[in-house]
Image: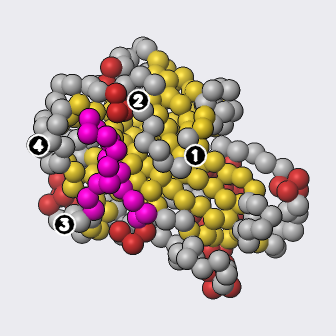
Amino acid sequence: MLMNCSKNWVISLKCLVIGTALAQLAQGHDVFLRPTAYHVNPGKEVDVIVFDGDFEESVYAITTGSVDHLQKSNSNGIQIAETSSWSAIEKDSPLWLETKKKNGVLSGVDLTHTSSFKFKPETSGSHVLGLTIYEFRIAFSLEEFIEYLKSEAALEWDMSAYGFTDPNGLIRERYTKTAKTIITVGNEVSKQATEPMGLLVEIVPLTHPSKAKVGEALQFRLYEAGEYLADHPVIIGRKDGLGSGQENDRLVLQSDNEGIITLPVSKPGIWYLKFIKLAPSPEDDRMDFFSRWASLTFELK
C-alpha cells in the first residue's frame, strides 16, 4: 500500500511525490474479502483472501500493520476477530496451488499480492467479517483525480466548483477503506447478515442473500457513520460478469432517500458491491478531500 502519512499531520513532500506517482495505481485500489467458501459446516476452517486492487487482481499484499481492526459478527454479537494467522500468500504455497484447480469459488484467480487469514466459525448461522484499514493519504493531478472519480466512485464532479482548475496542481486526499463478507455456517440463516456492524461505511443486505433466488430482487442499505447514505452510486459486479460473454461489466445503481438500492438477481455466483463516499475536507484539514470506501462480497446460490 502507499506510504502511511496518517500518523503525522504534516504532509511531507516525499509523501506527496509518492502519492502522485502512484495515483494511477490507487484508482483501482479497492479492498475485498474473498473467502475460499461462503457456505461451511460448524468448526470448518476457512481461508479468507484479502484483495487490495480490484475484485480479480490485487496490487499489494496488505499487512497487519495497515489493519485498524478486524471484526466478526455472529450470534454472540460483534467482536474483534483474531489476526494472528494473517500473512501474505506465497507463490506455490498450498493455498496458491489450490486456486489453480478447476473447482472452488476462487478457481483460476491469481493470488499474487494478496494476503489471507484463517476463520473458524463454531456456531451455525450467519457470520459477517468486517475489515477496516488505517487512514492513508495520497495526492493526484487534476486529470488523475477526475478519472478516479469517474472510474472508481461513479461520480462526475465539476472540479472548478471546488476551486481546482490548474492541471499542474495537486489534489490531496485522505482515505480509509472497509470490506465485509458474509459466510453462512450450517443450514441456519440468522439476522447478523442484515444488521450493521458499526463500520465507518458499510453495505447491509435487508434480505439475507442465502434466501434469494434468481429472478427475485435483493435490497441493500448504505451506511455512513451509522446514518443512511442517500442518493449515492453503488458499483455492482459478479465473478463471471453480469451479462452473457462479458466478464468485466458492472452495474451502477443509485441509493434512494433512505439509502436503499434494489438489485435484480440475474444469476447465481459470487457478487460484490462497493462505493466510495467522497467529500471536501473541513477548512482546518490539510487535505482537500476525504473518502471512505466500502465493499461487500457474498454468494448467491
Q: Nearer the viewer, mark 3 or mark 2?
A: 2
Q: Does 111 appear above or below 187?
A: below
N-terminal of the pair, mark 1 or mark 3, is 3
Which quadrant of the structure image shows residue 285? bottom right
Q: Does 30 appear above or below 68?
A: above
* Secondary structure of residue under mark 3: loop
N-terminal of the pair, mark 4 or mark 1, is 4
Q: Which of the numbered marks, if any, corresponds to residue 194?
A: 2
Q: Are marks 3 and 2 in contact (CB under 8 Å)?
A: no
Crowding around mark 2 (Cα neighbors within 10 Å: few <14, some 14 to 19, many 20+) is: some
- Given residues 152 and 81, the one toward you in this image is 81
Crowding around mark 4 (Cα neighbors within 10 Å: few <14, some 14 to 19, many 20+) is: some
Tell me the CA gap for discs 2 and 4: 23 Å
- Given residues 89 and 103, the one toward you in this image is 89
Badge 1 amino acid: Ala
**x, y percentage for residue 214?**
38, 17
**x, y percentage for residue 176?**
54, 59
Q: Which residue is mark 1?
A: 225
Q: Which of the numbered marks, if any, corresponds to residue 92?
A: 3
Q: Are marks 4 and 3 in contact (CB under 8 Å)?
A: no
Tell me the CA gap for discs 3 and 2: 37 Å
Tell me the CA gap for discs 4 and 1: 33 Å
Q: Which of the numbered marks, if any, corresponds to residue 43?
A: 4
Badge 4 amino acid: Gly
* Secondary structure of residue under mark 4: loop
Tell me the CA gap for discs 4 and 3: 27 Å
Q: Nearer the viewer, mark 4 or mark 1?
A: 1
Q: Quadrant of the C terminus?
A: top left
Badge 3 amino acid: Asp
Q: Nearer the viewer, mark 4 or mark 3?
A: 4
Q: Does 229 appear above or below 18?
A: above
